[in-house]
Image (cartoon, coloured by chain):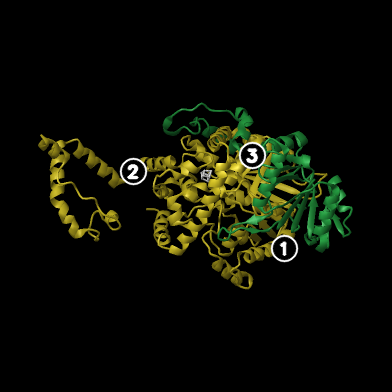
Chain colours: A yellow, B green
Amino acid sequence: MSVASDQFKGDATRVSKDEMQRALIHRGLKKYEAARSIRQAAFQDWEAARQTAAEIKWDAVNHLDDYLAEFADKIEANGAKVHWASNSQQAREIILGIIREKKARSIIKSKVMTGEEIHLNECLEKEGFDVVESDLGEYIVQLREEAPYHFVFPAMHLARGEISELFTKELGTAPTENVEELTMIARRVMREKYLSADVGISGGNFAVAETGMISITENEGNARLTCALPKVHISLMGIEKVLPKMRDLALFLPMLATAGAGQALTGYNSFYGGPKSGDECDGPEEFHVVLLDNRRTELLADSEQRDSLGCIRCGACLNVCPIYRNVGGHTYGTTYQGPIGSVITPHLRGLQDWKHLSNASSLCGACTQTCPVKINLHEHLLQNRRNASEEKPVWWEKMAFKGFEFVMNRPFLYRIGSKIARLVFPLHELVKASPIDPAREWTKTRELPPLAGQSFREYWSKRS
Amino acid sequence: MSEREQIFGRIREALRNPAPVPGAHHGESLPPVTEASAAPHIPEWLPLVGDSEAERLELFKKNSIELKADFRLLDSEEEVHAQIAELSADWKRVATHRNPLTDLVCDRIDLPILCTDGGYDAAEMEECDVGISACDALIAQTGSVLVTSTSAGGRSLSVLPPHHIVVARRDQLLSDLPSAFALLEERYAPDYPSFISFITGPSRTGDIERILVLGAHGPKVLTILCW
Ligand code: SF4
């Protein structure tokens, strides 16, 4: 059993008993569900749109070499500098290198999940830089020194009272239960930061090969300010984010908004194709794009699960997942939570350490059904289970199946076995759910169905 | 070997195994549709927009209400001036850029004006009460305003001041997103501005208890004057 799986079990048990947290999550997700169903119904043909989105992503991912090269060459021709990082360490070094060379002190960030993946904040803070998350939810979890709870709604596990307390403690502001006032506190803090920051770091939702642009989707305007005011803009993204054509965004942007938050279109969808050009009046002097592999190519090599690289990180699969809803985001202990996190984390961070996530599923298939790009999520969870046991069989499971096979191939043994089982079954009542019950894992929370009084064979032979 | 080459090496190696086409569950086979053949159909799948100008205007209006954007459909330049006179009552300072439409509006404003053309000081812009900009297009389908660094006075004008006013002519109203992308291509390809944005309503957040708050970091008010 890995450390991660112990942590998962412990946290899952704790959170599923935490009524407050669960109520908050359920209330938030109810709102999401209502808004999403209206938006999805407004599409003339959501299913056709989904199929096409899946096909465009299939084309992009299955010709990643061509599109990635096209993207990099185009955006460099527009004056950006492209950097390549095979792993987290290289990505951190590249970013640190740029910041040091610019003699920058203060850094403003807009949401970048890839940054969480490479632990960028910790690294920059350790080096003594002043780093601030500008997205409201990310700022709140940064102040609490915890990871985002949900990769789209990072602070959805916190009630306004807790946020007010946090601001009072960290910023010295007066306590308030007013959500608007809380938001304005963060706005005021951030305003100064935008103007004084030397470097802005952003993520990217899509990388358009045809035109050499990155596309950033957000509601607050913090990413726009991050990419407009500081002299240097660094964008960190995974290599799988490419889209072939700019016009593909006409489909992906409304689908991302609909699946992600039940919006027709997110507040700001902005495309950045380079630094400030000669005839423009503002924008950064330098634009760096850092493209990260970090074992994405290993996932790419698994042709069965390759489609999971087409994920647009809308978060819909988390929102509908009965497991996510009950164990919460932090329990996963991963950068990407929920079904998509359970599928890709074993590829990105090691199958044996993260295979337990494949069992955190009821296999209901709600994730697959909701996914706007048709990733076969619940089947991938099964494939991960299979791969994990093929790679490293569990001895007692193997023994159990050997034993099962042995008995099943010998009818007389099976007959004797089922007779004995019927004789001793009533005795089970005596030990049920106690520490010596061999079926305790099951019986401590559930009833064991009773054995039928006679076997089918006995029933059949007596029938006439 | 450079890092770039190494990454490309791994990608090419990985892609040697073909992957099943999307939507094919349990080994069922589906004919792959190519992107080129799908593009013309996208408008048929996205939310419906009417054919006439009146329907487009109606939809833009409806979307603006939902988005809490302040859309004002006007009939003459005189009305535009009257609206600006009303809006500007407690402004102290205005930011804008040079463009026939913004010139028309700003000519009658008797306040200090910061013009972004040729560069400006961001701290000064932050002090302005309002940013007035033109745009490339309005999009009925989503209630969006399409701006670029070329058409709307740079990257900050439409996001830094607490109030953003967009001035547009009626013939700038497009029906849907695919036509907005077609316009971008026609107007700018292959030398796109370094910044393009679809602005859909005022800045917003739902990060605290999923409760909507306007003016998270960008403008709290988005006014669209269209005539
Ligand atoms: S797997 Fe699908 S549903 Fe889940 S986040 Fe990615 S795109 Fe959205």
State whether label 1 is within 8 Å of ligand 1.
no
Q: Nearer the viewer, mark 3 or mark 2?
A: 3
Same chain for the residues under marks 2 and 1 in the image: yes
Q: Earlier in the sequence, mark 2 or mark 1?
A: 1
Assess disc 1: are there few (<14), some (14-19) or many (≥20) residues with their C-alpha within 10 Å of its C-alpha. Answer: few
Q: Are marks 3 and 2 in contact (CB under 8 Å)?
A: no
Which residue is label 1 attached to?
A192
Q: Which label is found at residue B40?
A: none
Rendered view: A141 above or below B176: below
Residue that protrudes farthest toward the top in the picture: B31
Tell me the residue that label 3 is attached to: A249
Is mark 2 in CB contact (under 8 Å) with mark 1?
no
Element on which disc 3 rests: helix
Q: CA distance from mark 1 to mark 3?
A: 33 Å
Q: Position of residue B105 (x, y in %)?
A: 85, 51
Q: Earlier in the sequence, mark 3 or mark 2?
A: 3
Viewer-side label of 2, 1: 1
Closer to viewer: mark 1 or mark 3: 3
Queried on whether the Cβ of the residue with tag 2 lies below 8 angstroms from ligand 1, the answer reads no
Residue A393 — which label?
2
- List x then y, in percent, for residue A28: 52, 57
The amino acid beneath tag 2 is Pro
Residue type highlighted by circle 1: Glu
Task: Find the distance from the CA under tag 3 to the CA under tag 2.
Answer: 44 Å
